[in-house]
Image (cartoon, rainbow, N blue to C red):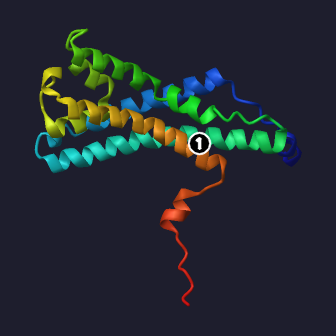
């Protein structure tokens, strides 16, 4: 058994499979956020404070799954480069940051077209497909009409979508470079006194 582990060769992950896995993580996060929002629907109507807590929970679920996907992809790539001589793809963090949350970008373009009046008002459908954003939108308006979302709301929604890409990009780079953010932030060693 030990010999099998020592001689087990890692294979380079097919880029299309990696992309589909990232999109799959995105879909799983939507389902998990849907469950959270449906279970807490009554609470979301009570106060802005509770809506903010639910919004943070759905954001953590979504960004956590994107983090997980990019973290393990970076670890795999690092091992392949270090131990198996694979050439490092320096554009991989950018590719992953654009493709993992790709469905969110496609729907964001649809949101812009709705706001511009090019297509009809499907904002309710947009929120259903982006359930993790629904608590954020509910903090500012309970309306499901695109006309009630002002420019700041569109900027906020855009920021949330870009935050997914930023999470993937930064996670991949830091993991690949062996930077353990958790240890730096939470387990700081006390500086010796002079």
Q: Nearer the viewer, residue 40 or 180?
A: 180
| For residue 123, above or below residue 82 | above
Q: Is residue 4 left or right of residue 93?
A: right
Q: Where is mark 1, residue-wise?
A: 172
Q: Nearer the viewer, residue 41 or 92?
A: 92
Q: Residue at x 78, y 34 (%)?
A: 87
Residue 16 visible within the image: yes
Tell me the quadrant of the picture where the N terminus can be found: top right
Tell me the quadrant of the picture where the C terminus can be found: bottom right
Classify residue 86 by image quadrant.
top right
Residue 38 visible within the image: no
Mark 1: secondary structure: helix
**How far across and down, in percent of the image, does residue 64 sit?**
45, 43
Q: Residue at x 49, y 63 (%)?
A: 185
Q: Residue at x 41, y 39 (%)?
A: 163
**How far across and down, in percent of the image, does residue 9 sit?**
82, 36
Q: Residue furthest top?
A: 119
Q: Is residue 62 left or right of residue 154?
A: right
**How far across and down, in percent of the image, does residue 133 sit?**
29, 34
Classify residue 130 by image quadrant.
top left
Q: Residue at x 34, y 36 (%)?
A: 159
Q: Is residue 92 left or right of residue 147?
A: right
């Amino acid at each position: 058994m030990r010999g099998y582990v020592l001689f087990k060769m890692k294979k380079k992950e097919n880029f299309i499979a990696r992309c589909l896995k990232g999109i799959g993580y995105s879909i799983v996060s939507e389902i998990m956020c849907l469950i959270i929002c449906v279970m807490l629907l009554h609470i979301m109507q009570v106060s802005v404070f509770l809506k903010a807590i639910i919004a943070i929970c759905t954001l953590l679920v979504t960004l956590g799954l994107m983090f997980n996907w990019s973290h393990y992809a970076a670890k795999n790539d690092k091992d392949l480069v270090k131990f198996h001589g694979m050439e490092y793809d320096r554009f991989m963090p950018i590719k992953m940051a654009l493709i993992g949350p790709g469905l969110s970008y496609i729907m964001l373009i649809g949101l812009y077209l709705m706001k511009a009046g090019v297509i009809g008002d499907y904002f309710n459908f947009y929120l259903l497909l982006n359930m993790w954003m629904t608590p954020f939108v509910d903090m500012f308006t309970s309306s499901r009409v695109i006309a009630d979302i002002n420019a700041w709301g569109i900027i906020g929604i855009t920021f949330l979508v870009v935050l997914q890409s930023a999470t993937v990009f930064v996670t991949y780079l830091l993991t690949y470079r062996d930077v353990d953010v958790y240890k730096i932030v939470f387990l700081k060693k006390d500086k010796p006194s002079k």
